[in-house]
Every structure is written in C-alpha cells, then in structure tokens.
Image (cartoon, grey):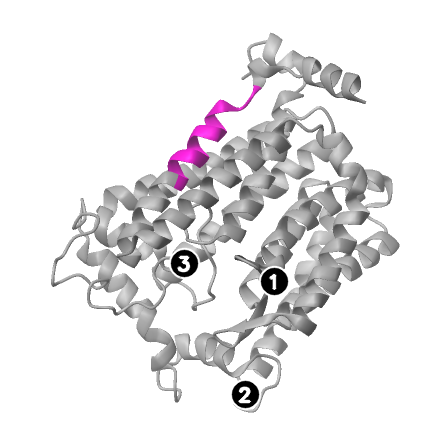
C-alpha cells in the first residue's frame, strides 16, 4: 500500500503544480484576516481565522497529494454523508439568529451546508461523467434533479435561501459545461419564464407561505421600501454603500479611529462575515476593493484553465464546478453589499470570517491542485501553460 502511494507521488508532474492559484488564494486569505481584525476590533477573531487558515492550508496540501481519481470513486459516499449531516442539522442542529444551520462540536461549530457545495460538485462531476451518453435523456435529467432537490430542500428548511441558490447555479453550470443540449436549455428557459412570473406573483402576496417572513421582507422590501418592516432589512445595505462610498480611492486605513467611519459607528451588524467587502471598501478604498475582486477573478480563471487541461472529463467538471461556485458566491456577496440585489446573507470566499467556509473552499482547491499535477502532458511540452 505504501509502495503504491509512493509510486503515485512520483508520477505527479510537480512542475505543473498551479502555483499561481495557491498564491492568489493565500494572498486573498491574508487580506481577509487583516480586514477581519479591523472589522471586529478584536484579536480573537483574527487569531481564530489565522488558525483556520493554517489548518485549511495544511488540508489543501494533503488533498493535493491524493489522486482525485481515487477520491471521486466514493462519490455516492459523499452524497449520503452530506444528506445525513443535513438531516442531523434539521433534527438536532443548534439555532443562532433564528436559523438552524450548525452542529455543535466541542470547540467547533460544523456547518454542513458549506461542505454540501463541495460534496455536490464531486458527486455530480462523477455522475455526469459516468452517464454522459445519457446526459440529454429525460430519465437522467429527472434523476439528477431529484438528487439535487433533496439536499437543497434540507438547506432551505434551515432556512438558507442564499446557499440553495448558489448550489442550484453551480449545478446548472456543471450541466452546461458537460454539453447539455441547447434545445433542452432553450426549452428550460421557455418553461422558466412563466414559472418565474407565477412564483414572483405568489411571493409578492402578503399572506404567502413560500418564504419565511424575514426573507419576504428582505426581497420584496428591497424593491418596495414602503412595506412594513422593510426598513429594518434595508438599513445594513444602505449603510454598506455609504461606507464603501466614503472610502474614496485609498480608504481610511485598517483599524482607523475615524469618527466618520460607518464601521466605528456600529452601523453594520456582523461586518466580518457577509459584509466584509464593506470594510474592504471603507478602509482600503476603491484600490483595495478592485484588488480583492481581481484576485477572485484570477482564482476563477485558474480553476477554468486547470479544468481545460485536465486529463479527463471528471477532472474538468470538478475544476469548472469549483470555478463556478467561487464566481457565483463572490458575485452575489458583492452585489448584496453594493445594494444591487436583496440581502441574502452569503460569505465572500476566502475573505469572510468563518472556519467552515475556509475549510471547504481550501479542500476544493486541494482537489484542483491535484488535477493540475496530472494535467495532460502535451500542454506542458508544447508550452501551452
């Protein structure tokens, strides 16, 4: 067994390791740790995130050395474990802020929905690759939707609408990348239009039962501030764009004591998580905000590049799925804090405070790094790096 492991380690193309991806992820995380320290005015959060970063980096390196073809063989195991964890949350999870999303473990709170994103990417990457010839059949599409809906419904019940949306968008990206027929895509869009109109109409009704009350006020109140209670859900976004605008070109500086600071005035609740980009905008300014966005874009591009050079389809699907996940989650988070869309409560990848988010994302990056170690040799030999 040890000889097989050593043999496999020797077969890797270490000169092909995606160093750029590692650098982009680490730099972005370090920026996040510095901003978290400023957002919380506390060393505790900074130290916990730093420990989380060290643990996540170690896990990323370990996973990077494990053959993803071996990892992907247990795709049904990941799916079942994921469902069991989500079921456990729904029955025995701990409540915080009106949501039940965590499992209390001594010294740590596990949030399974964060790992669901990675588990489902691995699961559907293998499932699509295995049954690719049946991709455009009704039977496969129906089975895939059922397998997707089960965990999504459990996450919606927590309730966690934003994570559910990101998972659905990532799934759609995987299906598109895998070669889903354009006729089917066109048909789905044609069906989605009337369904969306009906859904929007039903949600807009005061006595609707589709969304939780706070979700209703967040979404409908975003477009109609006159709705009772909407102001309580809009104030954080309004303060967010005020803070970002006040940052100017270079910002007010990390850990500043400016009396004009929105953060220092405690106008943002939990700024170290969902609204971390607000602190970036206010304290690092336009330059800092662009730097963070650019790093996120570069990470997504590296994921897609590695996917294009993957030795097989399952490797390509994993990389592109991770790239889509980071892209969608980043876009939604930044769109929320800049008040382009209703508040959804979603973390900014690699930047926001939270060990669960950091661990799951670094684990996903570890798999991508292993794909890069096994890239098709002709790319490197022909200089197509």
Crowding at mark 1 (Cα within 10 Å: few <14, some 14-19, many 20+): many
**What is the quadrant of residue 102 in the picture?**
bottom right
Q: Tell me which residue sits at (27%, 43%) in the image.
A: 288
Q: CA distance from mark 1 to mark 3?
A: 18 Å
The N terminus appears in which quarter of the rendering?
Answer: top right
Q: Is residue 97 above or below residue 102?
A: below
Query: Where does residue 237 sit, x and y in percent of width and height?
Result: 33, 67
Residue drawn where x is 75% and y is 14% of the image: 7
Residue 31, given in percent of the width and then of the height, sits at 34, 41
Q: Earlier in the sequence, mark 2 or mark 3?
A: 2
Q: Which residues are magenta?
A: 17-29
Disc on res. 164: 1
Q: In the shown orientation, is residue 328 left or right of residue 141?
A: left
Q: Earlier in the sequence, mark 1 or mark 3?
A: 1
Nearer the camera: disc 1 or disc 3: 3
User: Of 3 and 178, which appears nearest the observer?
Assistant: 3
Whichever of callouts 1 and 2 sits on the residue coming sooner in the sequence is: 1
* Residue 205, label in figure: 2
User: From the viewer's perspective, is residue 260 above or below residue 157?
Assistant: above
Q: In the picture, residue 374 is in which quadrant?
A: top right
Quick one: SS at disc 3?
loop
In the rendering, at what x and y percent does residue 65 appear? 64, 26
Horizontally, is 142 left or right of 330 in the view?
right
Residue 202 visible somewhere in the drawing:
yes
Q: Secondary structure at mark 2?
A: loop
Asked whether 52 or 17 is in front, the reply is: 52
Q: CA distance from mark 1 to mark 2?
A: 22 Å
Describe the element under mark 1 as helix, strand or loop: helix
In percent of width and height, residue 82 lies at 71, 56
- Image marks 2 and 3: residues in contact by CB distance under 8 Å: no
Q: Which residue is mark 3?
A: 273
In the rendered image, residue 161 lying in the magenta stretch gets the answer no
């Amino acid at each position: 067994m040890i000889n097989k492991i050593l043999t496999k380690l020797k077969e890797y193309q270490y000169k092909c390791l995606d160093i750029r991806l590692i650098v982009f992820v680490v730099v972005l995380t370090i920026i996040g740790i510095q901003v978290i320290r400023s957002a919380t005015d506390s060393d505790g959060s900074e130290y916990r995130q730093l420990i989380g970063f060290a643990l996540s980096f170690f896990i990323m390196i370990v996973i990077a050395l494990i053959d993803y073809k071996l990892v992907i063989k247990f795709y049904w195991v990941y799916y079942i474990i994921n469902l069991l964890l989500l079921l456990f949350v729904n029955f025995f999870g701990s409540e915080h802020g009106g949501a039940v999303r965590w499992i209390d473990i001594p010294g740590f709170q596990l949030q399974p929905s964060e790992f669901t994103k990675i588990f489902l990417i691995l699961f559907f990457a293998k499932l699509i690759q295995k049954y690719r010839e049946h991709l455009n059949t009704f039977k496969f599409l129906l089975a895939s939707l059922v397998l997707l809906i089960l965990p999504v419904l459990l996450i919606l019940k927590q309730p966690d609408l934003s994570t559910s949306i990101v998972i659905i968008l990532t799934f759609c990206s995987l299906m598109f990348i895998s070669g889903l027929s354009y006729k089917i895509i066109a048909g789905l869009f044609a069906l989605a239009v009337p369904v969306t109109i009906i859904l929007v109409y039903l949600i807009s009704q005061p006595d609707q039962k589709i969304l939780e009350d706070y979700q209703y006020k967040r979404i409908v109140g975003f477009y109609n501030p006159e709705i009772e209670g909407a102001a309580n859900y809009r104030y954080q976004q309004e303060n967010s764009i005020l803070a970002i605008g006040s940052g100017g070109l270079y910002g007010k500086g990390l850990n500043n004591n400016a009396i004009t600071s929105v953060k220092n005035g405690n106008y943002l609740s939990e700024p170290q998580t969902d609204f971390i980009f607000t602190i970036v905008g206010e304290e690092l300014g336009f330059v800092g905000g662009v730097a963070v966005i650019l790093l996120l874009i570069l990470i997504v591009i590296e994921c897609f590049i590695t996917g294009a050079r993957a030795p097989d389809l399952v490797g390509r699907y994993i990389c592109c799925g991770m790239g889509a996940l980071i892209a969608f989650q980043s876009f939604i988070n930044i769109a929320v804090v800049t008040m382009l869309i209703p508040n959804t409560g979603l973390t900014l990848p690699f930047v926001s405070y939270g060990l669960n988010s950091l661990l799951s994302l670094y684990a996903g990056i570890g798999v991508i790094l292993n794909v890069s170690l096994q890239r098709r040799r002709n790319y490197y030999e022909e200089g197509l790096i």
